[in-house]
Each structure stands twice: as structure tokens, then as C-alpha cells.
């Protein structure tokens, strides 16, 4: 397995866009965010793909400053974690989570947050429930924190 960063591999922009927009929609939003991430001096956002044998995309995730949620006092956020169906059950999500935690430390962050409706998954990887946050569309999500 190999984790690749969009910032270190800008020529892979279309591959990143294809993966994230296929699973989360909003292709133009991702295009704008990812394109800007290639030239900003800010440490965020960051985008990562997990590649398997022969360079096949296994999964991906991002580090962003806000996950479209009311708790703008918290950052960075782990976002858009997704493992392709055929690769699930192999702890590849755990591999990405651990890598992003290390990246946060490298960037100088002491905590990592995420918003989700999943209960029981992220707790296995050191996240604890903080409370609920409100998204721009009025929906609520659970907010988790990992101390790094």
C-alpha cells in the first residue's frame, strides 16, 4: 500500500477529482478546493489517496479547515474518508486515519476532528465523541476528536 498526497503529486489532480467526486458528488467544489490547495501557502487543505497493487485506488481522505459544520473553532478535520467496497474489511481505513494523524502532527496540529453519523467506527481509532454540530443544510452530525 502507498499513500500519495495531491500536493506532492499535482499531476494526479484528475485522479483525485474522479475518486472523491464519484463517492461524494460535488465535482466542481472538489475541483476548486483541490486546485487551490496546490498553490496555497496554508497547510490546509490536503488530499490523499491510498493506492494498492498496480497503483489501483483503494481509498482516500482529506484534511480540511472546516467540514461544512458549525464548529468553526475546531480544526483540522478528517473528511471524505472512503474505502472502495472491494477493499473493505482489510483495515485500510485505519491505515489512512493513522497516516492523517501523523500528517497533522507534522503540520503542527495537536488534535484532529471529524463529523459523522457513524457510531462505533472512529472510537476504535482513538476518537471520542464531543457533541453534535450543525451543517449548512440544518442537519446534525456527531463530532469526534482525537488528541494526537
Image (cartoon, rainbow, N blue to C red):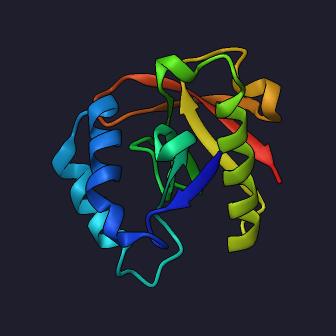
Residue 52 seen in render: no
Question: Which residue is the extreme one toward the bottom?
Answer: 41
Q: Position of residue 32 (x, y in %)?
A: 22, 61
> In the visual, does 141 lie left or right of 23?
right
Count all numbered tags in the image, as a single digit.
Answer: 0
Q: Residue at x 48, y 78 (%)?
A: 42
Q: Position of residue 127 (x, y in %)?
A: 77, 34
Question: Which residue is the extreme one toward the front?
Answer: 54
Question: Which residue is the extreme one toward the left?
Answer: 28
> In the visual, does 42 lie left or right of 131?
left
Q: Quadrant of the N terminus?
A: top right
The quarter of the displayed image where residue 139 is located: top left
Q: Position of residue 107 (x, y in %)?
A: 68, 72
Q: Residue at x 45, y 23 (%)?
A: 140
Q: Residue at x 56, y 40 (%)?
A: 53
Residue 66 seen in render: yes
Up-down relation of residue 147 to residue 8 (above or below): above
Q: Position of residue 131 (x, y in %)?
A: 65, 28
From the viewer's side, name the closer residue of 16 and 136: 16
From the viewer's side, name the closer residue of 104 and 147: 104
Up-down relation of residue 138 to residue 127 (above or below): above
Q: Quadrant of the C terminus?
A: bottom right
> In the visual, does 111 lie left or right of 1?
right
From the viewer's side, name the closer residue of 54 and 145: 54
Up-down relation of residue 135 to residue 99 (above or below): above
> In the visual, does 38 lie left or right of 70?
left
Amino acid at each position: 500500500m502507498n499513500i500519495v498526497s495531491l500536493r506532492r503529486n499535482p499531476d494526479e489532480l484528475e485522479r483525485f477529482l474522479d475518486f472523491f467526486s464519484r463517492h461524494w458528488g460535488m465535482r466542481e467544489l472538489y475541483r476548486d478546493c483541490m486546485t487551490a490547495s496546490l498553490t496555497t501557502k496554508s497547510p490546509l487543505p490536503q488530499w490523499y489517496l491510498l493506492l494498492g497493487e498496480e497503483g489501483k485506488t483503494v481509498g482516500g481522505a482529506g484534511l480540511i479547515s472546516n467540514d461544512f459544520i458549525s464548529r468553526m473553532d475546531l480544526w483540522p478535520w478528517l473528511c471524505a474518508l472512503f474505502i472502495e467496497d472491494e477493499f473493505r474489511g482489510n483495515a485500510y481505513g485505519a491505515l489512512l486515519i493513522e497516516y492523517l494523524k501523523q500528517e497533522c502532527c507534522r503540520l503542527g496540529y495537536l488534535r484532529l476532528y471529524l463529523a459523522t453519523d457513524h457510531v462505533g467506527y472512529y472510537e476504535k481509532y482513538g476518537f471520542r465523541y464531543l457533541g453534535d454540530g450543525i451543517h449548512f443544510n440544518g442537519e446534525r452530525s456527531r463530532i469526534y476528536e482525537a488528541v494526537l
